[in-house]
Structure formats: structure tokens, C-alpha cells
Amino acid sequence: MDTKQLAIHVEGLNKVYRLYDHNRDRLFDSLGLARKKRYREHYALNNVDLDVYQGECVGIIGTNGSGKSTILKIITGVLNPTSGAVQVNGRISALLELGAGFNYEYNGIENVYLNGTMIGFSEKEIDEKLQDILDFADIGDYVYQPVKTYSSGMFVRLAFAVAINIDPEILIVDEALSVGDVFFQAKCYHKFEEFKKQGKTILFVSHDLSAISKYCDRAVLLNQGVKLGEGSARDMIDIYKQVLVGQYELPAGDKKANLAADEDIRKAAAGKTDSPEGERDPAGAAGPAQGGGPEPQDGPGTQPDGGQPVPGINVQALEYGTKEAEILEYYMTDGAGLRTSAILKGETFTLHMKVKAHKDLPAPIFALSIKNIKGVEITGTNTMVEKSFLESVAAGDVLTVTFTQKVRLQGGEYLLSLGVTGYEGDAFTVYHRLYDILNLTVISDHDTVGYFDMESEVIVEH
């Protein structure tokens, strides 16, 4: 990393907004008539540092209101910081929120020239790129109509086509791709791959955690304006999911400086919990390394008779939860019932969990998810989705849970995550989660394209 050149350098960045309870307070303050402080300070960004090197693809993740869009706007010059330094080395093309940089009264062609001029291109240079932009956007004759008549999908097609085809050295994208249809999104991500191969720099904000995991060399996690950490996309995604359910302990200094200044927003963010595992929520959020879970006498790391360790257990797995229900044991068996971590493609394997309830629970949900070693979620399910267990349990109950499935995954290494969650009233609660706790090796001599085998029957006839 030391030999690489900095593309973006952000140091000690702060963006502070004044929040007023009444409009009259804002008026008095603007006129200089306020004799006392009539506002509260909200830190949209609080002492954030960030370095992005040339050729990197860096993702920024966090809950709504965490400062993701704010930092992009400051880097691109749309907003001014309250304090701190920003240095950009290279020509930026930015696709921020829908509508940024477009004149709604102009037609598509006029907006292409407007955006190109703002970035620093001459009319001749835009002429040379115009056809490529129009081909990529693929909105037909609508390009001659005022953009105020466009659908959101057409709008983002044109905006991204401009941003991606004006040959930027740094591309900044803020969640805009979620508006386009699936075919357009695929085309955009293919362009991302091209940019990465060309050694260009990408700064990418998205709530699509699979995209962050797949395309980003590393990720930065923001929460309520504070940078919680940066590192591999997989590690930051795990911590982010812990933040989502309110079970990540923020540093005391960060709480004092930022969260206490805006308690209502903090609570709103904590309330945006993820859905039960195996639906849209891939199992995972990081906490301190806790080994392979608790180790009772018949614990997860040993055979029931106290013999050798169970194959495939990650002894440094990440876990968290209230522990009001606890996963005591977990292992895999093959079709013959033998414990193993290696399964032949096309065979059946079973995941076993033993769970103990430490209090009365209304309807616990038991979950399993599988991801590849890059952290991309492949599949998952839970007992609520499968409608296999919808009962309450009493304190002290011990339940044995099994997930049995045929292995259709391609040959390779996979990671299994386990969870026990549930709803208490309207609140989604995580009782115990174990992330990447088991390694599954799929052995195959016949791999097709992608993550899994469709088991196609192919017939060719004359």
C-alpha cells in the first residue's frame, strides 16, 4: 500500500448542522438577535479520516443518517465541511442522489453537455463521447425530451451513462444503481469490473452488502457520523449487522461527542433492525472473538464422548446476542450420519444445532446461512420461513434443530453461520448468532458456471 498514490485524502472531517426547535429561533439566530443558544448541534460527520488509494474500490456502509452521502458530497465539492481537510488527486465523476447536477428543464442531450462541461470537458470532447453515452443509457428518443418527464429508471440510466463514459480517474457512486432495472444494474457492475481492471479508483456507497463484498477491496463503516472502522469488506459487514440490531458497543467518546447530541436520530437508527436471518438478512455481525461458542461438557468443539474436535469448526468465530437462548452444540453430518466438514456435490448433509432457552421465549427462530469465502451470501433459511417451528419455549428447554439439504453448490470452500432470533412484541431480538462458525468443503468433479448447479438436462438433436 505504501507504493500506491493517494487518490482521496480526508483528515479530521467534521460537518455540523444546527437543529432548531422553532422557526423563530432560526430567524433570531440568523439575524444575530439570539441572546442564548437556541439550537442543538448535530454532527453529520465527526472527525472522520479516510484514505483511498489509486486503483482501489472502497465501499462505505452504514445505517441511514450515518453520514455516507454527506462525506461523498464533501469530497465532490457539493458541500463544504465545517472543518477538516479534503484532498483529491484526479478527475472525479460522481453519481450522487437522483437529480444531482441535472437541470430538469433541459432535455437529455443538453444535460449530457451540461454535466460534461461541469466536469471540465470541452464541447468537442463531449461530441466524441456522446454516442457511447447514448448507447449505454439506451433510453431511445426520450433523450430529446425534458428530463422532468423521465421515470426514475430512465433518469438514472442517463446519469450513470454520463458518469461512466466521460473517462474519470475517480468514480463516486451513491446508491443510485438501486433505481435501475436488473439488466441495467448488471451492465453497470460489468463496467465496474472494467474500471477496476483499468486501475481506476471507485468510492461506492450501497446498502447492497453482497455488492460491497464482491466488488470492494475494503470497506469503511460509518455510524451516526463516526467512523467505527475500516478493513476487509467481510469484517466491516459483520460489524455493521451488529450495529443494525443495536448490539455493537460504541466507544464512550463517540457516544459523548455525537450520539448524545442527537438522541432521537440515534434511536431511530437503532430501531431499523434487520429481518430474521434467512430472509433478507444474511447472518452476521462481528463482535470480539469468542472462540467456537460456549464450551459446556458436551460442547460444540468436542464429540459428545469428549473425544476429538468436530471437523470444520472455526475456533475464532465471531458471536454476539443477548444469550437469552444459546447455541450449545453445532456440527455437520453426511448422508450416512458421520460427522464431517466435507460433502460430495449432489449428496445430502445435515446441520445440527442444540439450543437452550434461558428464559421463556414467545417463538424463537432458528437460522442457517451459507456464504463463500469472500463473504457473499449464497443461500439461507430459517424455521419461520420454512414454517417448521412456530411455538413458544420455556426457560430451561433444550431443543435439537436440524437442517437437511442436498448439496448443489459448486466445488469449493464455504462458511456456515447459525442464529437464534425472534420477535418480542414488534422488536426483533438476536439471542445468539455465530458467524462463519463452520467450514463446508464441497468436493466436485463437475462444476458448472456460478454458485450452484441447476442440474440441467441437456438434449441436442439433429
Image: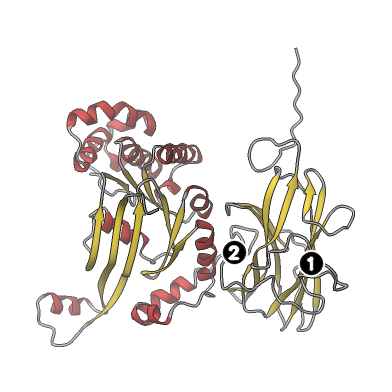
State whether residue 416 is above or below residue 242.
above
Q: Quadrant of residue 422?
A: bottom right
Q: CA distance from mark 2 to mark 1?
A: 24 Å
Q: Is residue 42 left or right of residue 185?
A: left
What residue sits 46% from the left and 39% below the top? Answer: 193
Give the class, few, some or many, for how many residues have Cα within 10 Å of label 1's Cα (few <14, many ≥20): few
What residue sits 26% from the left and 71% below the top? Answer: 16
Say which residue label 2 marks. 284
Q: Is residue 312 left or right of residue 251?
A: right
Upstream in sequence: badge 2 or badge 1: 2
Give residue 341's position: percent from left, percent from top. Answer: 77, 56
Say which residue label 1 marks. 309
Q: Quadrant of residue 196?
A: top left
Q: How is the image coloured?
A: secondary structure
Whether residue 362 can be seen here: no
Count of numbered circles in the view: 2
Give residue 388's position: percent from left, percent from top. Answer: 77, 63
What residue sits 18% from the left and 76% below the top? Answer: 26
